[in-house]
Amino acid sequence: MQKKYLAALAVAFLSASMYMPEMVSAQTSASHVALTAEDIRGLIVKNLGAQDNTVAVSVTGGIFDVLRINSYMNEATHPEFNKDASAVASVVSKAIADTAKYKRIHTIRVRYVTRSGPSAKDKVIDSVEFRKGGNGVFEIHST
């Protein structure tokens, strides 16, 4: 008896998903919750295998700013900065995709800085920017 109910439920769900796909897709997109900037920072740390205190993030206006602080990258070449920044931008762009919270983000900026103390001013070693194109994809921007 219980098998019949389960089978009927499965048929009803499959029928609903075939004839009313907007209901099924609405449920899945509604469950997509925007991550906080701190959550995204954690994803960057994990993806890069970086030390926790070497990554900071902030959002100001349409810019998602990532700082790589006193990291092993401080001695890198510009092509190495670009490669590392591309990995960072990939994590950020995937995390903010299709979320209303980050809809206004048009630039992902990754800056490599040295900081000598908690209240010391950062010294920028290099900076790499990614701008959102008309297709919604963030691409490296060179000047």
Image (tube, grey):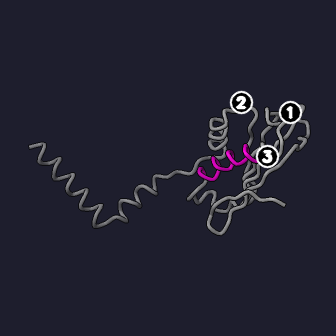
- Please state which of residues 112 and 7 is positioned toward the viewer in this rendering: 112
Residue 46 x/y as whole percent:
63, 35
Reply yes or no: does residue 90 show up in magenta: yes
Quote the CA–CA distance across marks 2 and 1: 17 Å
Residue 78 x/y as whole percent:
83, 46
Q: Look at discs 2 and 1 and give the one toward the viewer.
A: 2
- Please state which of residues 66 and 89 is positioned toward the viewer in this rendering: 89
In the image, is residue 133 above or below residue 71? below
Q: Is residue 33 left or right of residue 137?
A: left
Q: List the single residue furthest toward the bottom.
A: 134
Amino acid residing under circle 2: Gln
The residue carrying pointer 3 sits among few (fewer than 14), some (14 to 19) or many (20 or more) residues within 10 Å by Cα, namely: few
Amino acid residing under circle 3: Pro
Q: Assign a secondary structure to mark 2.
A: loop
Q: Look at discs 2 and 3 and give the one toward the viewer.
A: 3
Q: In which quarter of the image is the N terminus?
A: top left
Residue 14 x/y as whole percent:
25, 57
Label for residue 118?
Answer: 1
Q: Name the residue under label 3.
A: 79
* Residue drawn at the location 91% of the way across and 36% of the way down: 120
Label for residue 51?
Answer: 2
* Residue drawn at the location 34% of the way across and 64% of the way down: 21
Quote the CA–CA distance across marks 1 and 3: 29 Å
The residue carrying pointer 1 sits among few (fewer than 14), some (14 to 19) or many (20 or more) residues within 10 Å by Cα, namely: few
Q: Is residue 140 left or right of residue 14?
A: right
Sequence-wise first label, 2 or 3: 2
